[in-house]
């Protein structure tokens, strides 16, 4: 939840130092994936909340999984999953900072969640 990547690295180092003796494999795993875990700092700050959570994926698939057990053939099951996902889609809200998505897709650089201005 740090404001900048630099602050996040400091907090990350403190966390690893605090727990690596007790949980060495977990600390190694986190350290190996540090760049991936902190990659959201390269995106607009408005979108960080969405990037740091898997809840939308889990919620959608939980709904589908509960209703598709034993639905018959593979084709029937796929059709049911598609329709359930389309129904769930109606209640989704737009991403925070959705107006910035075209810039993200075009590869406009963001540093610590702020658009990098051309020099």
Image: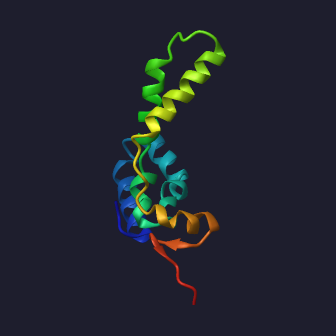
* Placement of 40 over or under 113, stated as above or below: above
* Placement of 88 over or under 72, stated as above or below: below
Q: Quick one: quadrant of the C terminus? A: bottom right
**Residue shown at the point (50%, 67%) measured from the top left:** 100
Image coordinates of residue 48 in percent, x first then y, are 42, 59
* Placement of 70 over or under 59, stated as above or below: above
Query: Is 31 on the left-hand or right-hand side of 45?
Result: right
Colouring of the image: rainbow
Query: Is 10 on the left-hand or right-hand side of 25?
Result: left
Image coordinates of residue 5 in percent, x first then y, are 44, 68
Along the viewing direction, whichever of 94 and 19 lies nearer the viewer: 94
Q: Quick one: quadrant of the N terminus? A: bottom left
Query: Is 43 on the left-hand or right-hand side of 17?
Result: right
Query: Is 94 on the left-hand or right-hand side of 109?
Result: left
Along the viewing direction, whichever of 13 and 87 lies nearer the viewer: 87
Image coordinates of residue 18 in percent, x first then y, are 33, 52
Residue 78 occupies quadrant: top right
């Amino acid at each position: 939840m740090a404001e900048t990547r630099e602050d996040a690295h400091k907090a990350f180092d403190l966390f690893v130092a605090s727990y690596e003796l007790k949980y060495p494999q977990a600390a190694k795993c986190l350290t190996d994936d540090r760049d991936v875990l902190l990659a959201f700092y390269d995106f607009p700050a408005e979108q960080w909340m969405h990037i740091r959570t898997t809840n939308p994926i889990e919620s959608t698939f939980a709904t589908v999984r509960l209703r598709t057990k034993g639905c018959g053939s593979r084709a029937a099951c796929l059709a049911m999953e598609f329709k359930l996902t389309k129904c769930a889609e109606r209640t989704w809200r737009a991403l925070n900072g959705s107006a910035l998505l075209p810039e993200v897709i075009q590869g406009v650089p963001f540093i610590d969640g702020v658009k990098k201005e051309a020099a």
